[in-house]
Amino acid sequence: MIDLTGKVALVTGGTGGIGSAICKRLAEAGARIVTTYRNRDKAVAWAAEQEFEPLLIACDVGSYEDCVRMREELEAKGLPVDIVVNNAGITRDATFKKITPEHWRQVISSDLDSVFNVSHQFVTQMTERGWGRVINIASVNGQKGCFGQTNYCAAKAGMHGFTMALALEVARKGVTVNTVSPGYIATDMVMAVREEVREQIIAQIPVGRLGRPDEIAGLVTFLSSDDAGFITGANLAANGGQHMH
Ligand code: CAA
């Protein structure tokens, strides 16, 4: 039984498919949940449906200034962050010929800059307290590439480079840094892929189905626990066997 009582977990993009499942699991293990949002109405409606009481903070994680403001808001509330789950992310899929500089920048900003912007607020305090967890939610596509996702694959592969470098810097201070690379999970992001393309993708998954958000959340909760203290700098794949290496 994982016990995270007394820990504060910040999950970026916690109102989305995978993020929501992560918040729920961490809350069940006893953590106090903080999540960022960009759309207030959606976040308030989401919070009302939960069996725990998340703290909602408006924050564009692609903006360093917004992340500073978030840290100040949490400090003012006396909430030190012990666990950061960098989960917020977007796709802007297009073949390289059609991709625009704006689509490139949006994805790099939301999916990769955000990992620096958010982690930079909280990791030094974790090292000072001698305990912390940073968990970066990347993607199978950052490991194997994906047709139509040069922006997303660059961001997701970059996340793991960040994981390995930061893991080295904080390893002696009780802080672990890991990447979780989900495969195709049944969320709005994956359901937005054209149906015939999606069917072709599912046909390539040995388990024979899309993953469930819970299957990612369980792994994140384990990585947050004391039992995972010797796992750092790792990239844990949860992709139904679609990519093995
Ligand atoms: N490999 C090789 N060629 C391919 C291909 C592939 N995987 N997919 C398409 N092509 C070819 C097509 O056959 C077509 O060839 P012709 O021009 O000779 O007919 C050409 O490339 C153009 O293909 P599309 O008609 O599909 O191009 P499009 O511009 O309409 O769409 C796309 C491009 C939006 C990228 C579309 O291919 C697509 O949606 N692909 C899936 C991308 C994907 O898997 N995204 C994951 C989103 S979910 C996620 O990211 C979560 C996560 O972490 C896993």
Image (tube, helix red, strand yellow):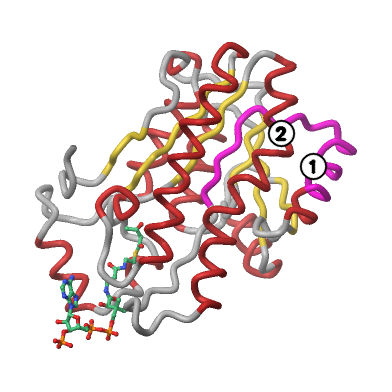
* 149 to the left or right of 221: left
| Along the line of sight, the residue nearer the viewer: 203 or 159 | 159
Residue at numbered disc 1: 71
> Which of the image's four quarters has the N terminus?
top left
Residue at 65 percent across and 62 percent down: it is 43
The image shows residue 222, relative to residue 49, as above or below, that is above
Gap between marks 2 and 1, in whole Å? 8 Å
Q: Three-letter amino acid code at disc 2?
A: Phe
Q: Three-letter amino acid code at disc 1?
A: Arg
The image shows residue 13, relative to residue 28, as above or below, that is below
Instruction: Let me know if residue 84 is in the magenta part.
Output: yes
Residue at 25 percent across and 52 percent down: it is 144
SS for callout 1: helix
Part of the protein shown in magenta: 68-87
SS for callout 2: helix
**Image quadrant of ligand 1?**
bottom left
Where residue 6 sits: x, y (%)?
Answer: 68, 22
Residue at numbered disc 2: 122
Query: How packed is label 2: few (under 14 Cα within 10 Å), some, or many (20 or more)?
Result: many
| Along the line of sight, the residue nearer the viewer: 150 or 205 | 150
Q: Are marks 2 and 1 in contact (CB under 8 Å)?
A: yes
> Which of the image's four quarters has the C terminus?
top left
